[in-house]
Amino acid sequence: MQMDFHYYATYCAAFLAGYSHEESLDIAYSSQFVDQCSRTLLAKIKAPSDAATTQLQLELMDARTDRVGLQDITRIWSAFHFLPRDLYAEKKGCGKRYLNKYRMICGPNSDLAVKTVELAKGKPLQSVGIAMHVLADTWAHMYFAGTPSLVINNTNYIFFELFPDGEGFKEKPITFAHKTSVPDDPVNSVYTNSLYQSSENSIMNLGHGRAGHLPDYSYARYKYLPAWGEYEEIVKDNPSDYVKAFAQMIYAMKYIRGAIHSFEKDTYDMETVEPLLGRIKEIIEKRQLIACDDWKAFGEELSGQTVTEYAMDRYFDEYTGSSKADRDETFLGRFTRGAIAHKGMVIDEIFKSGSKLAGYAG
Amino acid sequence: MFALLMLLSAAIVMEAPVDTALAMILLILAASNAADAVKDMIYYFTMARHMVGGKMILFKGVVMLDFALLTISLSNIPKSYILTYLVGVHAFSGAVEILRANESRKTVEGPWKMKFAHGLVNIALAALCLIFIKDLEVAVLIYSASLVYSAVLRIIIALRKTAFIVIE
């Protein structure tokens, strides 16, 4: 998912869940900041590097792919962007080495998703934002794993975009190129993806790189053969998944605020969404690479307030200008503590499942 | 890694007597093919057999093992045959490089022209080796020059930038 959903749509969901305009902005900022909080940035503001929630392209290019390096990558990507769906999943005839990777496949409504939301309850708004980022990504990044793996994350030439056509869908083959200088072309279904690399642990095989940015586009519906899927095609319906993500975020934040007593899997606040569904679907299904303007306008319609544009450095001065003792209570101090707590919880759960892919939380 | 092995082979060919040099190159080639084959097969049986299209990795492993066995069995034949075999392998890798360059031209950002030229020069040097096959010392020298050229090009291509999808 991109800034359109992690910032603007998250603002809308927070407001609909009952948070004030200011609170919703803080949650939205924290949710989007998960995509920016790299070790490079943390070093710049002198914050703890353990709080990294993403890795920059250059950091990944430099990353080691030995066991420790892979654990570091897996900690970040599986905790914040590809939350595993089932850490105890079984697949007939598979050895432990394969199974450990298979169990890292991301998906919504998992035990870990419930734990993520529960962990944010009673915590500052920054933790709520982090949890909403993770929850939303479980929908967008479904079927890919947050660890480098050819046998899980690879895709092949069988890749079709689906267009509504009467009762069903019309298929159009997707052309993948590897030219980052050329933007994705939704009109002709030409998208950029990562190059095929036959090495299992190549960084090119991390997450949805082989499917390009298709999982990040809310309008996209596509059909493909996932490497792990035993030759069964998967239809990914982003518009439907993004609506569910939005409704689940509202439900989760109502729970965190205390308006609901428990957070259950596969439950969505459709009651709140239903009257707005037409407008939401209009934004989600519009064929555009980024929907920030539309979500921003929608947020402003909902709250009647101006939704300030996302500025990554909004809280940097507050953090760097505080004494070491006071930093924990700044906006970014709360964010880093929330990130470390969430990361620790996910690493611990992966370790408890018998996998050493993410190492040990310590 | 393969490029470094090529440089090592070139150094051996230039320094050692022709007999020893060819035997050493055959050994290095066979050992590296065998290591690749074993690695591919272990990967297939532990992981890739569950992957869509994973059988390609097994086929690659079997072909590499075949190459390794064929290479090691060539030690007791005339030197000119050995050199012809090595030159053939070199020309084949040039042809593969040209095919890859053609594919890259359509979809990949990066120096496809370099890849294409690499393939062409490989084939040309292989042809030159065959022309001078009767003068074994000259042919061996040309072969070693082509190994150095290939190794340097491989290192440059390995260090080039490729598209990487930044996940959000």
Image: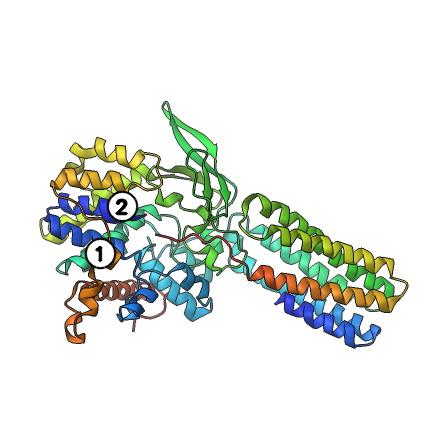
Question: In the depicted view, which residue is nearer to us: A25 or B5?
Answer: A25
Name the chain under label 1. Answer: A
- Where on the picture, by quarter, is residue A147? bottom left
Q: Is residue A130 visible?
A: yes
Disc marking residue A30: 1
* Residue A342 shown left or right of residue B57 in the figure: left
Task: Rate crowding at label 2 as few (under 14), some (14 to 19) or many (20 or more) other CA atoms within 10 Å.
Answer: many
Name the chain under label 2. Answer: A
Question: In the depicted view, which residue is nearer to us: A190 or A308?
Answer: A308
Q: Is residue B77 visible?
A: no
Which of the marked residues, 1 or 2, is nearer the chain's N terminus? 2
Position of residue A214 relative to residue A346, above or below, is above
The percent coordinates of residue A134 (x first, y second) are: 27, 54
The percent coordinates of residue A328 (x first, y second) are: 17, 69
The percent coordinates of residue A34 (x first, y second) are: 28, 57
Extreme residue toward the right, this view: B134
Callout 2 amino acid:
Phe
Identify the colour scheme used: rainbow
- Where on the picture, by quarter, is residue A40? bottom left
Q: Is disc 1 in the same subunit as disc 2?
A: yes
Q: Which residue is mark 2?
A: A5
Task: Rate crowding at label 1 as few (under 14), some (14 to 19) or many (20 or more) other CA atoms within 10 Å.
Answer: many
Residue appearing at x 45%, y 31% in the figure: A171
Callout 1 amino acid:
Ser
Residue appearing at x 63%, y 46% in the figure: B102
At numbered mark 2, what does the secondary structure look like: helix, strand or loop? helix
